[in-house]
Amino acid sequence: MKLLITGATGLVGKELVKKAQASGLEIHFLTTQQSKINSIDDAKGFYWNPECQQIDTSCFEGVSTIVHLAGATISKRWTTAYKKTILSSRIQTTQLLFNRLNNLEGDHNVTQLVTASAIGVYPSDFDQTVDEKTQVAPNSFMEKVVIDWEQESDSFKTLGVKVNKLRIGLVLAAHGGVVASLKVPTLFGLGAAFGNGKQGQSWIHLSDLVSLFLYAIDKQWEGTFNAVAPNPVSQSRFISALAKSLKRPHIFPPLPKFLIQLLVGEMSSLVLDSHWVSAQKVLDNGFVFEHEKINSALESIFNEK
Ligand SMILES: NC(=O)c1ccc[n+]([C@@H]2O[C@H](COP(=O)([O-])OP(=O)(O)OC[C@H]3O[C@@H](n4cnc5c(N)ncnc54)[C@H](OP(=O)(O)O)[C@@H]3O)[C@@H](O)[C@H]2O)c1
């Protein structure tokens, strides 16, 4: 079985490639950087330029599932221009894949698209747990990005391709992502929550996330699934678990909301919004998590070499 992975050189993609190859899957990947075409061992890289709608269509040869992870990072200052990049990098890439597959007029083997989505699609809520049936609406920038991205992905259904959208939570990994960003201040005893610290943080260990992608492919899932561990925690609890795993004190009170808003503007929603997200649907569909609790997830991350 062969996968075509976009964003294969990123945090999630790199780990997914490793685990997929270990399971005997062949990998094609698309990269926007010519220099990365030969960067992954035993995988075949292809260049694409989504802005110019340019792609090497031989990337589809023999592929049964496309895993679409590509997108500009959201962890960079949200200027007006960069907000356009966040959105367009997800929409243009999805359109390019769709258009070229459509042009092949059925002369391909693709039966499934598994795409990264995000729990940022849900309205911020400090009390209620949200699930895949929760009504979503484009009330914030992030909600709009994810809704548009998911809608674009759904166009593949018109090609007879199954569309599976994994709404990913905060990814916990040893090298990169939120843990890497918070590790240094926490090591210096400066770890602190934001706002009132009661925001729900729905996280997932990177290893579970890539297993979930592979499970979704194996089971040929369709529709929307939350990719989060079963036990979300408040942000204060998250920061104190992080400090505990690093054997450091957690003494700092949360940083005031107004200060965060003043410093980073609209982007403050990334740390001030609250998402208590249910993992029940993936559990009901037979997925077994390796890391269900925050303490063991963080311990495993810091024990990684
Ligand atoms: N990490 C998280 O906590 C998290 C949470 C929720 C959702 N997600 C979503 O999951 C996906 C993968 O996340 P990740 O953490 O692995 O992301 P990442 O490390 O930032 O990697 C994303 C990849 O996308 C490609 N890319 C970057 N800018 C692009 C652009 N302007 N146009 C086209 N491709 C571009 C890059 O690959 P090339 O340089 O090879 O082209 C990059 O390696 C993303 O779409 C992200 O939004 C992540």
Image (spheres, rainbow, N blue to C red):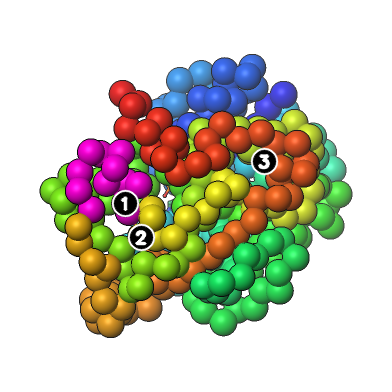
Q: First in sequence: mark 3 or mark 2?
A: 3
Distance in Å between CA atoms under marks 3 and 2: 37 Å
Of 227 and 277, nearer the camera is: 277
Q: Are marks 1 and 3 in contact (CB under 8 Å)?
A: no
Q: CA distance from mark 1 to mark 3?
A: 38 Å
Q: Relative to 81, is 232 on the left or the right? A: right
Residue 93 placement (x, y as % from top left): 57, 55
Q: Are marks 1 and 2 in contact (CB under 8 Å)?
A: yes
The residue where tag 1 is placed is 240
> Magenta segment, which residues?
239-250
**Residue 161 shows in this picture:** yes
Residue that numbered label 2 is attached to:
236
Kindly report the distance in space between the C-alpha atoms of the residues bearing marks 1 and 2. Answer: 6 Å
* Badge 1 or badge 3: first in the primary sequence: 3
Kindly identify the amino acid type of the residue bearing the numbered disc 2: Ser
Label 1 SS: helix
Question: Residue sitting at 79 percent across and 38 percent down?
Answer: 220
Q: x, y (%) of residue 63?
A: 71, 32
**Mark on residue 66?**
3
Q: Secondary structure at mark 2?
A: helix
